[in-house]
Amino acid sequence: AQEKGVGVIVCGMPVHADGTASEQTEKTKRFIQALQSKTGLPVVEEDERFTTLQAKETQMMGGVKQGNRKKTVDSIAASYILESYLQRENQKRKKEQIMNNEEICDLIAAQKKFFNTGTTLPVKYRIAALKNLHLRIKDRESEICAALSADLGKSAYESFMCEVGLVLSEISWMIRNTPKLAKPKKVASPLTQFHAKSFVIKEPLGTVLIMSPWNYPFLLTIAPLSNAIAAGNTAIVKP
């Protein structure tokens, strides 16, 4: 199982309709202990009440003939057991990932506080941050491509050409051109101040929010982030 990348085993637990243990429950628990000992993998117990009934209803709706139902009823019931487990895990994961209002406010306050220190204003700091971002992406390139493949079915070639490669190119361009972009620009002085020298200084906005769509999650998150860093901002990222 481990050779095939299995991380956990889901096992249906037979109980009475009221949730109390049955004779089959004890047999299943002994089987789970033996399975854990044999595989070394965690085994999750999943309530299998009514899954057989759901499976039979699915067969009827699918037009499966009476004589053929016995062959597939267990596999269909097993799919319902697995689906129940996956749904619960997804809900648990979403709850873990969701930040409450207090956490969001603390994060924004921390970013604003850091910006107000003036650390991000020097061009040298911005370039160093961009170089660090470029290095980290190169180090994790294979992991990023694997995530894009798992989430969106993108091949390694598409992931690099349409997302990772474009981001690296964007960051490289910013590293080369940030000194020029941040440089004060001379402009003509108005007639009333003809003795003066006028110029425009480009200042960062502060803390910016970056929200990206689902179809190009890496490109449309990190490319704007590199622009924000080059401009001297801090950022809150919402993929």
Image (spheres, rainbow, N blue to C red):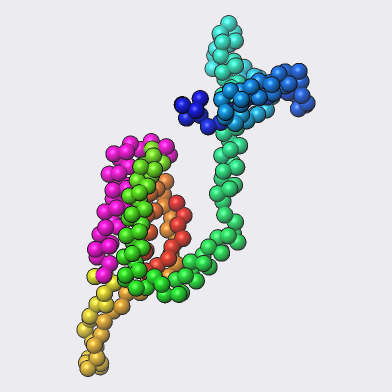
Q: Where is residue 69 in the image (x, y as percent from the top left)?
A: 58, 11
Apparent side of residue 18 relative to residue 137 in the rendered image (left or right): right
Q: Is residue 153 visible?
A: yes
Does the stretch in magenta take in 127? no
Q: Position of residue 94 (x, y in %)?
A: 56, 45
Q: Is residue 152 visible?
A: no
Apparent side of residue 177 relative to residue 78 in the rendered image (left or right): left
Q: Position of residue 172 (x, y in %)?
A: 26, 58
Q: Total marks drawn?
A: 0
The quadrant in which residue 233 appears is: bottom left
Residue at x 42% of width, y 65% of height = 234
Does the stretch in magenta take in 178? yes
Residue at x 43% of width, y 62% of height = 235
Q: How would you classify the magenta stretch by its main secondary structure?
A: helix
In this view, the residue in front, 184 or 64, is: 184
Q: Position of residue 8 (x, y in %)?
A: 56, 31
Q: In this view, does 48 lie above or below 89?
A: above
Q: What segment is highlighted magenta in the picture?
A: 150-179
Apparent side of residue 197 relative to residue 83 in the rendered image (left or right): left
Q: In this view, does 197 lie above or below 43?
A: below
Residue at x 47% of width, y 30% of height = 5
In this view, the residue in front, 14 or 187, is: 14
Q: Which residue lies furthest to the top in this view?
A: 67
Residue at x 42% of width, y 37% of height = 150
The quadrant in which residue 190 appears is: bottom left
In this view, the residue in front, 11 or 140, is: 140
Q: In this view, does 165 lie above or below 55?
A: below
Apparent side of residue 221 relative to residue 104 in the rendered image (left or right): left
